[in-house]
Amino acid sequence: MQAFIPRLGTAFTAGLTIALALATAPAHAFSDDEARWAILELRTQIKQINEQNQQARLQLADQIDMLRHELASMRGQLEHLTRRPPTGNQPENAPQDRQTADPQEQAAYQAAADQYRSGKYKEAATAFAAFTQAYPDSELSGDARFYLGSSQYATRDFKGSVQTMQDLVKTRPQDPRAPDALLVAAASQIEINDLAGAKASLQRIIKDYPNTSAAETAKSRMKLL
C-alpha cells in the first residue's frame, strides 16, 4: 500500500498545479485547445489516482481476509482437540470410560463425563474440578484434569484452561494426556493473544513429546504464529 503513496502524491501535485493554473491565469493565457488538453490531462490523472487507491484498498482487504482464514483454521484445528474421542470406538466429545475400585469415585467421574458428553461444559467443569479436589491421587486424575481444562476452553475460560493444562503437565509430565494438554493450552493462549506463551507451549510439545501426533500438529501450528 505504501508503494502507491509517492505516485499518488506526484499525480495529485501535478493535477493541483494544472487546476490552479487554469483558475488563476488570465483568460488569454491559454488557447481553447490548450485549455481542453489541460482539463483532459487533469481528469486522466484524477482517474489514475482513484484507480490506484481502489487497488490498494482491494489488496489490503485480501491480506486481511487471508489472515482471518488462517487464524480461523488454526483455532478450528486446535479446538477440535478438546472434542476428540480418546478411543476409536467412542463418539466424538466422549471422555474415556474408565473403571476404578471405589464406587463413589467411579460415580463422580462418570457424572462429570456424562455432562461433558452432553455438551454441558460449564457443569462438566464444575464436576471435574470437584473430582480432582476429592480424588487428587486417583488413576483418573489425568483424564479428569484434561477434561476440566477442555471444558474451561469450551466455556471461554481461557486463562483457567491454560492454568489447568499447565498444572497437569507439571505434575504428570508422563501422562498420555500431557502433549494434548499443551495443545489445548496453546489454543487458549492464542485466544487471549498470548502468542509468546502459545509458541512456548508448542515448542515444548515438539521438544518433550517428539514422537506424538501432537508434535506434528504443533509443528504445523508454529508456522502460523
Image (spheres, rainbow, N blue to C red):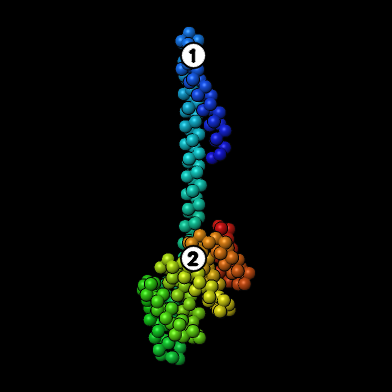
Compared with 29, 201 (above or below) is: below
* Viewer-side label of 2, 1: 1
Q: Residue furthest top?
A: 28
- Tell me which amino acid carries mark 2: Ser
Nearer-N-terminus badge (2/1): 1
* Disc 1 element: loop
Picture residue at 51% right of the left edge, 47% below the top: 63
**Placement of the C terminus among the 4 image quadrants:** bottom right
Residue 211 visible, this orientation: no
Residues 113 and 199: in front is: 199
Mark 2–mark 1 distance (CA, rounded to whole Å): 67 Å
Task: Look at the numbered discs 2 and 1 and tell me whether their residues touch, using CB distance below 8 Å.
Answer: no
Picture residue at 45% right of the left edge, 91% below the top: 101
Q: Residue furthest right?
A: 207
Compared with 45, 221 (above or below) is: below
Compared with 89, 195 (above or below) is: above
Residue 169 visible, this orientation: yes
Picture residue at 47% right of the left edge, 70% below the top: 161
- Tell me which amino acid carries mark 1: Ala
- Please provide percent x and percent y for residue 97: 44, 81
Task: Determine which of the numbered discs, if any, sits on residue 56 in the image.
Answer: none
- Please provide percent x and percent y for residue 30: 49, 11
Mark 1: few/some/many CA within 10 Å (<14, 14-19, 20+)? few
Provide the residue designation for mark 1.
Answer: 25
Picture residue at 49% right of the left edge, 74% below the top: 164
Provide the residue designation for mark 2.
Answer: 188
